[in-house]
Image: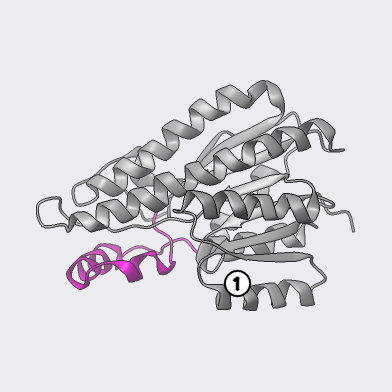
Amino acid sequence: MFKKLQDTVALVTGASSGIGEATAKRLAAQGATVVLVARRKDRLENLASELKNLGGEVLVIETDITDKKQAEHAVQQVIDKYGRLDTVINNAGLMLIGGVAEAPSIEWERMISVNINGLLYISHAALPYLIQSALTSDRKVTDLINISSVSGRRPSAGQAVYSLTKSGVAAFTEALRQETAGLNVRVAVLEPGAVGTELGNHLREDVREQLSNILSHIEVLEAEDIAETIEFIVTRPRRVAVNEILVRPTDQAM
């Protein structure tokens, strides 16, 4: 059976659960060697065992991407082992929502560190190798996908700083897309609506209850839905660049 990502190497941040985990499985099923990047090594090892049992090549890298040196070292480990990098999925993120007046500023700093700085560090370190692989690989194209949010497209009360970080992701992605358009590096932003992942687990208890009430009438997306969308983007022919996709649950109005 022909696999569209055979002989490619894909790096996925936030791979220990949710969208990252589901995406790693999808990319592996398409033949990619998958590099799992996150802080929870035990989770990564469990996922790696599952993928290896299915015949996939996997590399686990325990990394805090908010540390610039660690992020750069993670990318370098990939190059040292495989000599190439074809796909980067910047999935790691934090959603610490709540009103501005009562929010602890440490939550803002954590979101900026992960959602902005970590994404920038990985992107910057990976870009030269994505450009190189696009020039030398049989596919003649590579991909970098940044996971934003519907909140980056449509800010709302109670999500001010989260929306700030995710709108920043979208702006960075579009500018980078323009810079790499002539280099066969496809850069895309994916903006999910409500997804059933562990993001909500990090919320303060009162905020978690509020969010639960809001989502109680919505059939939220599953991580697999977003992973399938990512698979679609990175398996298009070289001539096709999907630059932006917004995916909401059918029941979600905003």
Q: In which quadrant will I find the N terminus?
A: bottom right
Compared to residue 52, the image places residue 250 above or below, namely: above
Residue 193: image location, x then y, percent? 40, 52
117 within the magenta span: no
- Report which quarter residue 140 is drawn in: top right
Q: Secondary structure at mark 1?
A: helix
Can residue 97 be seen in this snapshot?
no
Relative to 191, 54 lies left or right: right
Q: Residue at x 46, y 60 (%)?
A: 221
Q: Where are the magenta residues, as a range? A: 193-222
- At label 1, which amino acid type do we have? Leu
Label 1 crowd (10 A; few <14 / some 14-19 / many >=20): many
Camera-nearest residue between 161 and 217:
161
In the figure, is residue 215 to the left or right of 149?
Answer: left
Q: Is residue 204 magenta?
A: yes
Q: Is residue 166 above or below residue 177?
A: below
In percent of width and height, residue 211 lies at: 25, 64
Residue 60 pos. (x, y %): 66, 67
Residue 101 visible in the current orientation? yes
Q: Quadrant of residue 51?
A: bottom right
Residue that carries the numbered disc 1 in the rendered image: 44
Q: Nearer the viewer, residue 136 or 203?
A: 136
x 73%, y 49%: residue: 79
Judged from this view, the residue extending furthest toward the left is 101
- Going by the picture, which residue comes out furthest to the right? 1
Q: Residue at x 33, y 53 (%)?
A: 111
Image quadrant where residue 52 sits: bottom right
Q: Residue at x 56, y 41 (%)?
A: 123
Task: Find residue 12 and report its horizontal and vertical position in percent.
Answer: 61, 56
